[in-house]
């Protein structure tokens, strides 16, 4: 089964899928492997690997080591065209549709497409949308793009519909790593009513309860990064996984 189908399957079976982000700039290969194994035990559905900058030269090595140590699908969540590896199972082929910077709408994609083809990586085309988060995140700063204001749910909806009509397979509502405020449930809820493709929601989610609220509003896949890096404990991860899978049980 392709990775995207696995995610859809997880959503069908468990109500939503839980994705944990591993940023190669924020941990060593050993710590990432430890975390990946813990994620597998805790009931996480897939791992995302990527970062805004990539200072460390361990991108491919880290993915290879994770793949050797656990069976979870590893999906690249690239901060740019340099973040590609044949050891991953798939890549979110992002276009930053909330911005108007052509380099992040199509430039990086053109640079990376032939390499992705040669690596035979599965691509998951994703309409990537920055949502105002109460602070300027690294991704916003580096991509030189403004986020969609939190209260402008109609603007968010117009972008999400455009992604769907362009044939993208999912939307990523991104408050940004370490966001002060996560994506508002009102926005997720409105998009859920009108858009038929799945929504990934991430950025600034700090508690299992907050994660569950995103699922109840309509998120298909929930991402956490920072909070798990800071608390790499099985019980904590399990609480997130259980909350994200909770809706199905109700
Ligand atoms: C960032 O959505 C992800 O791209 C995760 O964000 O690190 O704030 O959980 P956090």
Image (tube, rainbow, N blue to C red):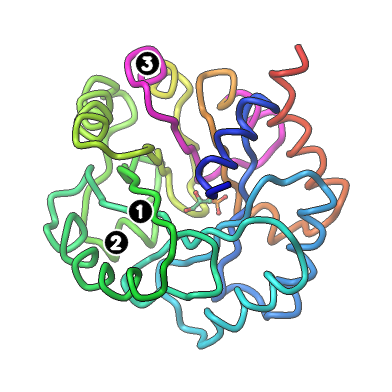
Query: From the viewer's perspective, is the residue at label 2 or at label 3 nearer?
Result: 3
In front: 124, or 154?
A: 124
Cα distance in 3D space between marks 2 and 3 = 27 Å
Q: Position of residue 112 (x, y in %)?
A: 28, 71
Q: Nearer the viewer, residue 94 or 179?
A: 94
Q: Is residue 9 left or right of residue 71?
A: left
If you read the primary sequence from the N terminus, does the residue marked by circle 2 or circle 3 appear first?
Answer: 2
Helix, strand, or loop for circle 3? helix
Crowd band around label 1 with a 10 angstrom C-alpha radius: few (<14), some (14–19), many (20+) = some
Residue contact between numbered discs 1 and 2, judged by CB atoms under 8 Å: yes
User: In the orientation shown, which residue stands out farthest toward the bottom?
Assistant: 57
Question: Which residue is outermost to the right?
Answer: 235
Mark positioned earlier in the residue sequence (1 or 2): 1
- Identify the disc placed on residue 136: 1
**Residue ID at (19%, 67%):** 110
Name the residue at 64% across, 41% down.
Answer: 18
Query: How far is the residue under mark 1 from the one under mark 2?
Result: 7 Å
The residue carrying mark 1 has its beta carbon less than 8 Å from ligand 1: no
- Asked if residue 196 lies in the magenta stretch, the reply is yes
- The range drawn in magenta is 190-213
Dot 1 falls on a residue whose secondary structure is loop
- Nearer to us in this view, 138 or 47: 47
Residue 52 lies within the magenta run = no
Q: Is residue 117 above or below residue 98?
A: below
- Residue that carries the numbered disc 3 in the rendered image: 190
Rendered residue at 71%/34% (across/down): 208
Q: Whole-percent x and y of residue 52? A: 41, 67
In x, y percent, where is residue 191?
A: 36, 21
Q: Which residue is mark 2?
A: 141
């Amino acid at each position: 089964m392709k990775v995207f189908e696995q995610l859809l399957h997880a959503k069908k079976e468990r109500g939503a899928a839980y994705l944990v982000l591993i940023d190669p700039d924020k941990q060593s290969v050993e710590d990432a492997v430890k975390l990946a194994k813990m994620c597998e035990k805790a009931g996480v559905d897939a791992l995302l690997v990527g970062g805004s900058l990539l200072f460390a030269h361990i991108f491919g090595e880290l993915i290879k080591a994770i793949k050797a140590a656990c069976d979870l699908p590893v999906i690249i969540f690239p901060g740019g065209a340099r973040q590609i590896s044949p050891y991953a199972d798939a890549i979110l082929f992002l276009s930053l549709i909330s911005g108007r910077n052509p380099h992040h709408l199509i430039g990086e994609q053109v640079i990376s497409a032939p390499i992705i083809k040669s690596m035979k990586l599965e691509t998951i085309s994703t309409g990537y949308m920055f949502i105002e988060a109460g602070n300027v995140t690294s991704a916003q700063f580096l991509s030189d793009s403004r986020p969609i204001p939190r209260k402008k749910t109609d603007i968010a909806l117009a972008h999400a519909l455009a992604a769907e009509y362009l044939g993208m397979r999912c939307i990523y509502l991104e408050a940004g790593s370490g966001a002060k405020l996560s994506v508002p449930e009102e926005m997720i809820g409105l998009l859920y009513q009108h858009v038929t493709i799945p929504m990934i929601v991430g950025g600034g989610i700090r508690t299992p309860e907050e994660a569950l609220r995103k699922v109840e509003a309509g998120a298909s896949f929930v991402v956490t990064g920072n909070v798990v890096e800071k608390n790499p404990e099985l019980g904590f991860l399990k609480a997130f996984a259980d909350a994200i899978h909770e809706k199905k049980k109700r």
